[in-house]
Image: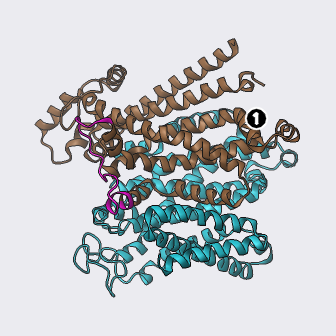
Chain colours: A brown, B cyan
Amino acid sequence: MGDVLDIIVKRLALGAVTLLVISIIIFGMVELLPGDVAQAILGQGATAENLAALRARLGLGDPAIVRYFDWLGGAVLGDFGRSAVTDTPVGDLIGPRFANTLFLACYAAVIAVPLAITLGVIVALLRNTIFDRVANVATLTAISSPEFFLGYILILYLSVKTGYFPAIAKLSSDMTFLDLLHRTFLPALTMVLVVVAHMMRMTRAAIINLLASPYIEMARVKGMPAWKVIVKHALPNAWAPIINVIALNLAYLITGVVLVEFVFVYPGIGQLLVDSVTKRDFPIVQACCLIFAATFILLNLAADVLSILTNPRLRHKK
Amino acid sequence: MNYFVIGYYALLIGASCLAAFYGKKSAFLLLFSLTLVSFIVGIIGGETWLWNITIAAGVIALCAGTAYAFREFLVIVTPYETSKALAKAPLTASFGLFVIMTYLIAGVFAPVIAPFGEAEVISQSYAPADENMLMGADQLGRDLFSRLVYGARNTVGLAFIATTLAFLAGTIAGLLAATRGGWFDQAMGRLADVIMSIPSLIFALLMLSIFGTNLSVLVIIVAIIYSPRVFRLTRAVAGNIVVMDYIEAARLRGEGMWYLVRKEILPNSTAPLIAEFGLEFCFVFLLIAGLSFLGLGIQPPTADWGSMVRDNATLISFGEITPLIPAAAIALLTVAVNFVVDWMLYRSSGLKE
């Protein structure tokens, strides 16, 4: 087991370094601005007093390195400074919205993951039949469509024409849990469609890749039924690639929601990010980017560690 | 029960029986499962849903017919080597080629095809379609069809330029890394790792907030975000070729690096690189469309599909499909490119099971 621990510790350290480099990039990008942040926010017509006041508020007097460590130290504790436009603490703005985004992502994941794996196994069983080809075309279409296309189709058919679900996912504090699920069903379904298609294809590919191995041949020759060969022999060995795909798609669910949130006016962190980019509110943009990047890296890290743990062959270096 | 429903089931069941009788297994399975699905859907949704299925089946049949005719056309027109490969292409691939060609024509000849200019206001806002306007007017009273045609030039053109840039940067860096190795390889590899570990849309939003939204910035940002993918693939493919005996022989002959790249490595890695170009184009195209949809990409009054969806989005609550048309145009092109790439990957890898 010492070896496994070694590999995992190395991966974790690598992840931490990547995160640090990315925080430097996110912070350093803003420093690249022509002029400075205050000038960029207020525009060319700003008076000297206003500029000086904003510079003092953002603490632009200190050298960049000092500000970077201040910012990073705050960010670790959840304090991202104050919004440059409204002066409210960024942490207060982001907190509830990040919870909303996580809720939406979990909602979609709970539906998508079991569905995708089941469908992937079924399609692998039916490979090279007409159903497989139909599924291939259908999933390819779902993956290639922009999220807002799927979102508006769902709004048109499930909300406007039939009225089953609300088109706008407004949240209020006095909703029951069932109400909440009903209200956020369409955005969740949009993401489920994209993610299921991708995961299904990868599950199918992972299983079919294994079907050429000798031990599968052996199981078949023994006279095992096809579904048993796949579920008992192929699936356990396909877990590593499948876990990777799931993690990648969960990362997508959290970061790719920006467009979905925009379509359904969902009060999540993606919506906040887009608004802040338009207003050039850099503290919020930086904070959102850092959170998204950190989530992305953590999920990929988790996938790596899990696939090392599930696959004994990865534990030993060749 | 009316004549439509009776005819519908009679046709489906008759066709599945014929397919079963003549031993067409896959056609039978498809037709009969459609019959079973129709039973359930018909009971739940009634006649309208059966109409929807009929229309969908008709559209799919029309697409398949077009694809089949276009493939036969290509087989006759192209020279022998190409036509031999095309004759075995699946219908999805030839449908993809057909769509790509249509977009290409629309983009290149946009001023000739479009009846009005892209920023020309010709009627009231949201005017319905009439004999003048094929698809009605948008929120400012501009002809939607003309803007759609110009969008093929602007949106697709921009995505193509950005992809080409990303591809050139990635391929050159990848080839250099594979042939030269050493510190350059290491440095580029780490750089690619860092860029790829930031989600692309987030990275694009960060850079756009800093450098502002204008076209050249957009193209460069997208190229930076997507070149690491190409770099990795090129390096992997070229890395496999560099260790071959014929490269060794060329090196011993005293050939320079430029010769090695141009005459030995590139010709042997074109197939995966072309497929990658297609995939890359899809990613770039979707990213640019998404950014435009968020109002941060191509700026008005330039016609662009992403921002057209956003501008007409309010119409969706009145049950109009207007905002879906530009969105469908985006989806159709990405699907088409993916179909063609799928076929190319299948051909180059020879995956059978």
Which chain does the residue under circle 1 lie in?
Answer: A
Q: Secondary structure at mark 1?
A: helix
- Does the segment drawn in magenta span residue A171? yes
Identify which residue, B278 or B190, lies in the foreground: B278
The answer to whether residue A18 is seen in the rendering is yes
As drawn, which residue projects farthest toward the front?
B1
Measuring from the top left, give residue A109's x and y in whole percent. 48, 38
What secondary structure characterizes most of the magenta part? loop
As drawn, which residue projects farthest toward the top?
A2
> For this view, does B243 lie left or right of residue A10?
right
Identify which residue, B298 or B103, lies in the foreground: B103
> For this view, does B255 lie left or right of residue A196?
right
Tell me which amino acid carries mark 1.
His
Magenta extent: A156-177
Q: Which residue is mark 1?
A: A233
The answer to whether residue B153 is seen in the rendering is no
Residue found at x 61% / y 71%: B95
Measuring from the top left, give residue A80's x and y in whole percent. 30, 27
Q: Name the image quarter holding residue B44.
A: bottom left
Measuring from the top left, give residue B46's x and y in whole percent. 44, 67
